[in-house]
Amino acid sequence: MPVDYSKWDKLELSDDEDFECHPNVDKASMVRWKQADIHKHRRERKDKLAALEREVAVNNRIIAALKQITNEPAAPAVVLAKLGVLHRDCHTWTEELREQYMSSLWKERDARWGPPEFEPFVDEARPKYGDLVEAVMQTVAGETEDVPEVRTALQTAAASAVKAIDTRNSSIAAEVKREEAEAAKKLTVDDLKEGFNKTVVSKTPSKAPAPSPAPAAATKSSTKTKTIETIHQPGGLAQSTDEQDDEEADQITYPPAQAFSELPDMEASFQMIGKHPELVSQRYSDMILAEGFRKELDGRPKLAQRCVTQALLLQYCSLLGHDGISLFFARLRSGRQNASEMFNRDVVDTYKRIHERVKVIKQNQKEEEEAEQAGLQARLEACTQPDGTLAIPINDDSTDEEKKRAEVFATFPHDFQRALLLSDVDAINAHLASLDKEAAQELVKVCNEAGLLSLEVEEEDEDDHEERKPAT
């Protein structure tokens, strides 16, 4: 009985041991080329399907607009104006489809794949929407009244345009079905799914606590920690450790990368890449792009644009490979439109996205600060008595802890009360600094026990005055 190996048909191997090539061709190089070719075709198929999906959405939008405009009774001049708007929209949508397809082809492209090529079915077979809409516009151009003859001609032309777009949608559906069937012939990572998941946790028996050592003799210096934090600390001062770690990860830590991000022209950039070819990597490109984001956030747009330019230079060089870097810079320096148009547009679009994102961040920060200040002012007004004094409001439902807090608060000077209510850390520290060491420590202790201040500890020498600073 013959062995059935059909269950392995969907496996696609690039480094099969039985793979043979010409004796004059290095087998390892051939395997790498074959692997790159497999991934290239998968990526191109994925980009093609995404582009066709976007095109179908645009086609449906144009069909709906044509039907709505031509079926509603209106004067020819009104119909012509609406069709004119649709004509301009069609031009915009066509450009967006082309730019999105081009961007997807270049995004994270392996240098071994070579420069991308447009798929004719995606880019060239698409109907010219502007010509279709213009043919509909000609049926009402020059007409003044909505008579049956004009209405019939208008609807006939619109039906012809809709039919052409419907035919394109049918072709897309057939092409998508064919590509999906081709993709289903081989297994990929996207086809993998979790079969089962099991976690085993071994609990070790808890050990008996070790006896605590005897207290050591007192020495001249001791370890203390003290950080002052108001109970209503402003949210803008809080920052998580994760956010700090993320910021540090995006910092430019390699001096040549920092110097490259500040270069003002192409010639200097080309010389720097020649001296430091290790800069041509996604890692340093991301670092410089993050630096540009920080420059824009700091209000330095020119430096931000320079960082964006330098980051994209590294991205393009990594895609073109070592042999294409010299030619790429030569064409950029020559000022040839075809060579520099795509790069310059990419720089402008990337900086525009950064600018808009920073604008949103600053607006959100401003709104949060205004809301926070409004809340603090509202709390201050709620605690302000008719005679101008300050007191924490209490009622019959207040707990003993809240009543004690109000009693302790009432013993403080007016300026210190105001600083606590407004979470003014500078004013709190200034008041503590005006007291002697023992009085300041006692005041902090009382505030801590009453829940008006939160304390943390930091190391310092006993002979020094305890540093009082706000927790962040």
Image: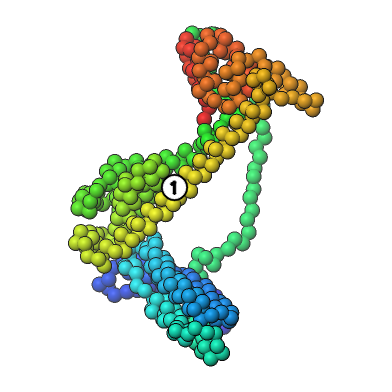
- Foreground of the two, 123 or 30: 123
Residue at 60% from the left image edge and 12% from the top image edge: 442
Amino acid type of the residue that numbered disc 1 sits on in the rendered structure: Val
Q: Is residue 417 above or below residue 104?
A: above
Residue 35 can be seen, yes or no: no
> Whole-percent x and y of residue 283?
37, 50
- Foreground of the two, 151 or 238: 151
Residue 448's quadrant in the figure?
A: top right
> Whole-percent x and y of residue 64?
55, 76
Q: Is residue 216 left or right of residue 330?
A: right
Residue lying furthest front: 144
Q: Is residue 177 left or right of residue 14?
A: right
Q: Secondary structure at mark 1?
A: helix
> Whole-percent x and y of residue 458?
51, 22
- Pointer 1 residue: 358
| Crowding near the residue tagged with mark 1, few <14, some 14–19, many ≥20 C-alpha atoms within 10 Å | some
- Quadrant (top left, top right, bottom left, bottom right) of the N terminus: bottom right
